[in-house]
Amino acid sequence: MAITVEQVYDALRNVEEPDLKKDLVTLNMVRDVQVDGKKVSFTVVLTTPACPLKALIERACINAIIHFVDQEAEVTVNMTADVTSRRGADGNLLPGVKNIIAVASGKGGVGKSTMAVNLAIALAQTGAKVGLIDADIYGPSLPIMFGVEQESLYVNERDGKQYMVPVEKFGVKMLSIGFMVDPSQAIVWRGPMASKALKQLFSDADWGELDYMLIDLPPGTGDIHLTLVSSVPVTGAVVVSTPQKVALADAKKGIAMFQMDSIRVPVLGLVENMAWFTPAELPNNKYYIFGQGGCKNLAHELNVPLLGQIPLVQSVCEGGDNGSPAVLNIESPAGEALMLTAANLAQQVAIRNATLEPTRSVQANAY
């Protein structure tokens, strides 16, 4: 008996998207169903190319056709992705950017910029279109970490206005105040000037179409954070910390800032950096020199996801210093952990977009 397209759709109604808790057909994730005798092919459109459950969903689709339709069916599943967005209609800044993600920390020295750089590259490696803004106005480090200190900025003219062209490397478009000032000179600006500089990185640059834009914020809470949430609709925030108590106390304050009633930016999760020390000569050993389980416990306490735990290894530090971030070596322990963290981040963005209200910029008089 010939297989029909309707049978394929009916079978795939038994395959649930693990995060969104609905079947693939209801979510309109099944496209281009074709049947030729016993041969069945179709496309599954994921919510992100970095989906950590991609292989699980593919297997479930194949099993559904064989179990519910025909045990002799030859099933081909084409896995693709279309990154979701839940932007409100307000504001004209960054109109082509689907998701704006703030990367923050309660205090300095926890590796926030290192995480922002590596997560951006990891998302780009999955096929997503990614941008990165170095909003750490007083201590821009992005040019060093990407090895592009000597790059010059260029401009394009459109509709009578000139726009900066972001520098691109490792598949990531980036801009930083570090490209515009003498790296040997300190940046001594009052809050309003720093805020104006950040807005220009949004409004005066040709970002084009992006799936994700990561914003590397300064440590703590202050003018730059408020400028960000009042200028553009922020999809969510990632907070980076190390496991020791003093860092966790400040991370808790950072999370509380995003959760204030006047701001209400969803916290997508915590990243625990320097979770343990692993010597290169003893790759299977873990030494918890900053304490164990600090971010895991805080994530549980505050009911936010723990996106990943990144080991303290020499390659992470060296990668940031020599312009070759650790995630580029995906077979290393750090590279593997960073790729998994990026996948979990993309997963949380998709869940946020499916379950929460559209994201909007905060009214300036709300704080």
Image (cartoon, rainbow, N blue to C red):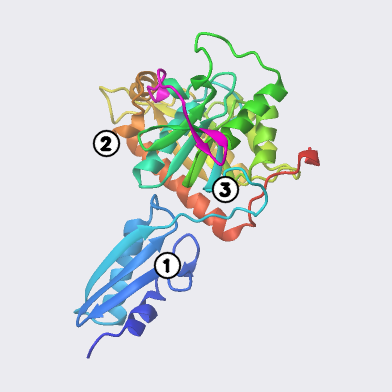
| Residue that carries the numbered disc 1 in the rendered image | 29
Taking depth in this image into account, of 115 and 280 the one nearest to the observer is: 115
Q: Is residue 291 visible?
A: no
User: Of the numbered discs in the image, which one, if any, rests on residue 95?
Assistant: 3
> What residue is shown at x 35% (from left), y 59% (from top)?
80
At numbered mark 3, what does the secondary structure look like: helix, strand or loop? loop
Q: CA distance from mark 3 to mark 2?
A: 36 Å
Please state, as top left, top right, bottom left or bottom right, where the N terminus lies in the image. bottom left
> What residue is shown at x 37% (from left), y 25% (from top)?
316
Q: Which residues are magenta?
A: 145-163
For badge 3, the amino acid type reads: Pro
2 or 1: mark nearer the eye: 1
Question: Which of the two labelled residues, at mark 2 and mark 1, occupies the earlier sequence position?
Answer: 1
> What residue is shown at x 43% (from left), y 53% (from top)?
48
Q: Quadrant of residue 311?
A: top left
Tell me whether the residue at label 3 lies in contact with that at label 1, contact meaning CB atoms closer than 8 angstroms.
Answer: no
Q: Is residue 159 visible?
A: yes
Magenta stretch containing residue 320, yes or no?
A: no
Question: Which of the two labelled residues, at mark 3 and mark 2, occupies the earlier sequence position?
Answer: 3
Please state, as top left, top right, bottom left or bottom right, where the C terminus lies in the image. top right
| Residue that carries the numbered disc 2 in the rendered image | 331
3 or 1: mark nearer the eye: 3
For badge 2, the amino acid type reads: Glu
Q: Residues within 10 Å of mark 1 (few under 14, many from 20)?
A: some
Q: Residue lying farthest bottom?
A: 1
Residue 248 position within the rendered picture, expressed as x and y whole percent measured from the top left: 59, 30
Residue 199 position within the rendered picture, expressed as x and y whole percent measured from the top left: 63, 33
